[in-house]
Structures are given as C-alpha cells and as structure tokens.
Image: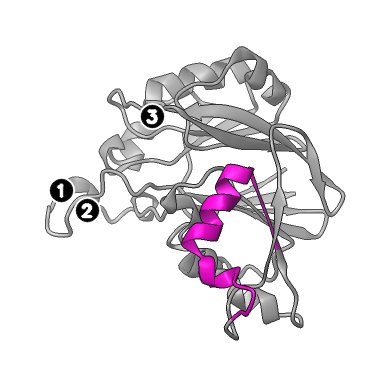
Amino acid sequence: MQVTFLGTGTSGGIPVLTCGCEICNSLDYRDKRLRVSVWVEVENKNFVIDTGPDFRQQALRERIPSIDGIIYTHEHKDHTAGLDDIRPYNYLHGIHHLDLYGHPRVLNQLKREFAYAFDERKYPGVPLINLQEINNQPFTIENILFIPIEVMHHKLPVLGFRIKNFTYITDVNFISEQELEKANGTEILVLGALQQEKHISHFTLNEAIEVAGKVNARMTYLTHISHKMGLHSEVEKDLPPNIRLAYDGLKIKL
C-alpha cells in the first residue's frame, strides 16, 4: 500500500502574490502547497480522496494512471472544485463511468455545482459519473474496506477514512472519543492542522499534536496547512519525533 499526498494546503489564509513574506519567498519546495488531497494505491487499485481545484495539476504531476473510486470527505469547494478534471479518466481505458462516494448531503451539492454532468441529455464530453451514497458505516470499493470516521468541522459533519492501517482526517476541530477509537492501532495517521493560532473550524498545531498522542500511531503527518503555520523547516524542529508536517508529493509505503 502506498499513499501519495497530492496536496497539503488550504484555500484559507492565502496571501496576495506581492506580500513578500518569508513563506512566499521560501525556496523550500515543502512550503509550496496545493489544495489538500491524497492518492491511495492498495492491492493494485487507485483511490483518490477529494478533488480540489488543483486536481488536474496534481494528477499530471504524480502520473495517476487510473482511478477506481473517488471518495469525498465533505462538500467544501476546496475539496470538490476539480471534479470536472476527472474526464480524461472516463476515456483513458475505454469509455466508463467513475464511481464517486460521498454522504448524500455532499452528493446533492455536487449535483447542484456540476449540474451539466447530471442532465438527462448530456452534452458530449461531460464527466461520466456514478454516485454512491455513504454514511458513517463501513463500505467496500473493489473489495477494499473503508471505515468512515465522523468528525466535526465547526458545525459541519465531515468524514475521515481508515483504510487498513492508514487513517486520513482533514478538516476537523472536534473528534469524539467514540469516533477516535476507530483509528486505534493505525500505523499511519494523517490529521488536519491549519495553523498555530486558535481557529473556529480547524485544529491548531498543538490541538492536532494532542489528538495524535491519543492515537499513538507509528507516524502522524499533519496536513491542510495554511500560510499562517510558518516555514516547514522551522515548525518541524519543535515537533515530536513521530509527528511530521506532510508536503506535496510525499509518498508513504505501508
């Protein structure tokens, strides 16, 4: 099993191009973050969790060969806006529809935002999609078990996912003890940590470190990192040895 971080950033807190701060001027590639998403390769299958606005660039950069399913955490635009860019995968190996998995609330939002893909009389070339409803119950795709973990993103329920010994949770500021138990024994934990200051809908760096300590995975990688977090190299100096900042293009083998 291999996990590739397609993006580890967020739309929030992005400065203007001329701000000239240390993050903008950084030459460290780890400080250049596209919107958050991961590619999971498991048992010769390829799954993508979320398709943000940068999905096309990410797929080209990582040369994703095929997609066996796209799973959505929630309906915010920075996690869904790249849906139209799945079209090449409809035709890559012959015409076929791609399965999209999401909570009914999320799928309804996709149908509104990408209405042209769901018209009865479709314009040639639109994304070919099968919608698959999921909720906070385990489900399988291509015989791979996905265990949802429901967390809160302010007042919005968001789904994280455990796949074998890998657990992925992005936009979050609260996880109940009951839901967190689903991550127990996981080898790799990915957890959202927006910035160092308090935020209404995201864990801070310290809050994420505290939650990671409860799970006690072999390694925890922090994602959904904003411009306000600071330089990658500086932040990592103060992290526990089993907690790292993720970066775009990072690959993890399990």
Residue 243 in the figure: left or right of residue 131: left
* SS at badge 2: helix
- Residue shown at the point (38%, 29%) measured from the top left: 201
Query: How far across and how far down the image is residue 90, in percent?
Result: 68, 76
Q: Are marks 2 and 1 in contact (CB under 8 Å)?
A: yes
Q: CA distance from mark 2 to mark 1?
A: 5 Å
Q: Would residue 186 be seen by someone viewing this image from the given angle? A: yes
Query: Which amino acid type is shown beneath numbered disc 2?
Result: Cys
Query: How far across and how far down the image is residue 42, in percent?
Result: 77, 52
Query: How far across and how far down the image is residue 49, in percent?
Result: 60, 50
Q: Residues within 10 Å of mark 2 (few under 14, many from 20)?
A: some
What is the number of the mark on residue 226? none
Q: Which residue is mark 1?
A: 21
The residue stretch that appears in magenta: 99-122
Query: How far across and how far down the image is residue 7, in percent?
Result: 47, 53
Q: Which residue is mark 3?
A: 201
